Image (spheres, grey):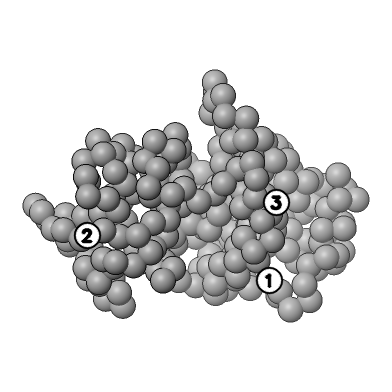
Amino acid sequence: MACALAAALMAIDAHAQTPRDCDGRSVGSAAVARVIDGRSFVLADGRDVRLAAVETVLPVPGDEDEARVAAALAAKAALETLLRDHEIDVSVTGAGADRYGRLTAYVFVRTPFGEVLVQRELVAAGHALVSPVAASPCRRFLQAAEREARARGSGLWGAPYSAVKQAADPADILADQGRFGLVQGKVASVRESAGVVYINFGQRWSNQFTATLLKRNEGAFAAVSPKALAGHTVEVRGWIEERGGPVVEVTRPEQIEIIY
């Protein structure tokens, strides 16, 4: 594993400099006691850390989807490999601790080959997806790594696991209910009712994929009005829920990308 990590770090592009201005507050160096899953671990002092700005496939007891289980285990193994026997720097985001008491942070590993942002390595290898956090140098850095992993078909972007669900297949989307995912499809219509904007991907909105946006949050989408999305093929990222059909609630413009 150590050799694999060394090889991975040596392969990092020279131009991919790790940004230090990640909207975080450094709490200093620390040692890692154990890894919980692909996005969280425990420090030697007992504090839990949750990686900021990324989402990984998480293990769920009883999950029978072999590809999903394999993806969750691969993400955990990759994080263990990155953190093992290395001192890390923890940079806590403005959110601080999440509702579970975990420090939400950007994590940097000190290696003989330079300082490495853990989130970037997970995303670049296809073990993690970029979550819709506020624009920052770190987010742009992670987005570039995600584009590269996607182009290579690495990890979550390749077979047998497909990171992108198709809006035309609501049953497949609902198989990932309660998980973070990406859904791509053509917007059929955009409607507003009772303070909610509905971005519909089918004629029968009650059982087909829909992205919802509270009207009071519409001002954040000044660059691209949700109503202008009709007829465009877009990609939506967020937490998949069920309300008749599959739904992703959109709160930030970073959650929607126009493909064409």
Instruction: Please say if 60 is above or below 85.
Output: above
Residue 18: image tag: 1
Quarter containing the N terminus? top right
Quarter containing the C terminus? bottom left
Residue 228 location (% of width, % of height): 25, 71
Distance from disc 1 to disc 3, alpha carbons, whole Å, reads: 19 Å
Distance from disc 3 to disc 2, alpha carbons, whole Å, reads: 50 Å
Q: Is residue 121 left or right of residue 180?
A: right
Mark 1 lies on a secondary structure that is loop
Q: Nearer the viewer, residue 52 or 78?
A: 78
Residue 30: image tag: 3
Residue placed furthest toward the left: 194
The crowd level at tag 2 (other Cα within 10 Å; few <14, some 14-19, many 20+) is: many
Q: Amino acid at mark 3?
A: Ala
Mark 3 lies on a secondary structure that is strand
Q: Is residue 231 left or right of residue 105?
A: left
Instruction: Please say if 136 is above or below 172.
Output: below
Instruction: Please say if 114 is above or below 159.
Output: below
Please name the residue shown 17% across and 62% down the image. Answer: 216
Q: Amino acid at mark 2?
A: Ser
Residue placed furthest toward the top: 62
Q: Nearer the viewer, residue 124 or 50?
A: 124
Q: Nearer the viewer, residue 170 or 223?
A: 170
Residue under label 2: 189
Cβ atoms under marks 3 and 2 closer than 8 Å: no
Residue 231: image tag: none
